[in-house]
Image: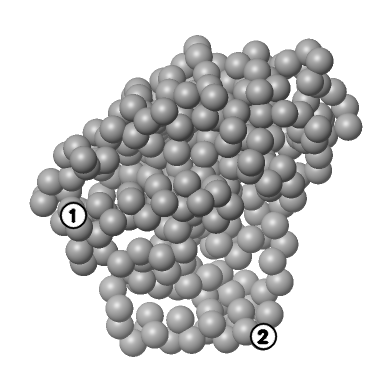
Amino acid sequence: MSIIKDFTPEKGHEFTHANLSFDHSLHERQMFDDAGLEQLLDQYPREKLGVFTMGEDPVAWTTWRKGSANGLSGSKLLEAAQAGRIWLNLRQTNHHLPVYAALADEIFAEKSAAAPKVRTFKRDLGMLISSANAQVFYHLDVPLVSLWQLRGQKRVWVYPVAEPFVSDEALESIVLRESAEQFDYDPAWDAQAEVHDLTPGKMVTWVQNAPHRIENGPMLNVSLSIEFMTPEALMRANVIYANGLMRRRLGAHPRVETRFNARTVGKLVVARSAKALNLQKPNPRILPTSFRLDGHHPGNLLAP
């Protein structure tokens, strides 16, 4: 039985090149009920678990805070998500748990069958468990992304990969890891965004580097987030990396090439050489741990 119900030839042709929505059946699987989520949270490496909270103003992205949940059982973690305002991010679940590795293989086998010309690698299947009314601020990702809704409801705004939504300089800064993936957002931009209301059984994927933001409905949300690369996506990321170096070191004003040509080859050589020589040292914005979850009072955030 297919996971994706409407992966038509037309969508297969547009896959990774357009914003697309799909229907799926993953929400019907027992592994995503409360017992399955508690087991997942118990088995997932606790040191890898991302625990976050945030403010209510979608503009105030600096209210995104990192926490810890050491010592809490899976049931207590799920209870905290149900009672508080937190976002649990289980990155690369497929790298840590065999059942999720099998799920990733199953999903990508379907994608390969429906879009045989798209070769994927660097596959990261992550689980997201988040509270009622929680949000993810305006940001963009370097890889390609698909977001699968399993429980609850959320609204996703997807914006064009163009100014004023994201400048070349801002995109380069993120690829070079000079800044966080989150950056300033203007609510007026919503008028030009694609809006997707996700309910269980809905999935959306968007073009590479598209800025987006997410708001949960008034209930617990469970989603599956998949990041991946293709040869074309990796080429684009390396071109942006090289552009950033050229702008910073040479004062150039390069643009992002969308086709493979001699100029692209030159930029790929620049990017690979810089990474090999470590000319651009990563300087990611690493959030300090500023709170811990209280297992006795779910939803309470305590100072570390």
Image point (36%, 71%), residue name? 231
Tag 2: amino acid = Leu
Callout 1 secondary element? helix
Image point (32%, 38%), residue name? 204
Render colour scheme: one colour
- Could you say where residue 25 lies in the image, as x and y percent from the top left? 28, 33
Could one spot residue 180 in this view of the protein? yes
- Which quadrant would the N terminus be assigned to in this image? top left
- Could you say where residue 16 lies in the image, as x and y percent from the top left? 29, 55
Closer to us: 247 or 58: 58
- Could you say where residue 31 lies in the image, as x and y percent from the top left? 45, 32
Callout 2 secondary element? helix
| Location of residue 19 with respect to 280 vertically, above or below | above
* Residue position for label 2: 277
| Location of residue 187 with respect to 158 vertically, above or below | above
Report whether 233 appears left or right of 186: left
Mark seen at residue 114: 1
Asked which quadrant contains residue 3, the reply is top left
Asked which quadrant contains residue 191, the reply is top left
Tag 1: amino acid = Ala
- The residue lying furthest to the right in this view is 304
Image point (76%, 33%), residue name? 69
Depth check, mark 1 against mark 2: the one in front is 1
Image point (76%, 29%), residue name? 72
User: Of callouts 1 and 2, which one flags the residue occurring earlier in the amino acid sequence?
Assistant: 1
- Which quadrant would the C terminus be assigned to in this image? top right
- Could you say where residue 62 lies in the image, as x and y percent from the top left? 69, 35
Could one spot residue 192 in this view of the protein? no
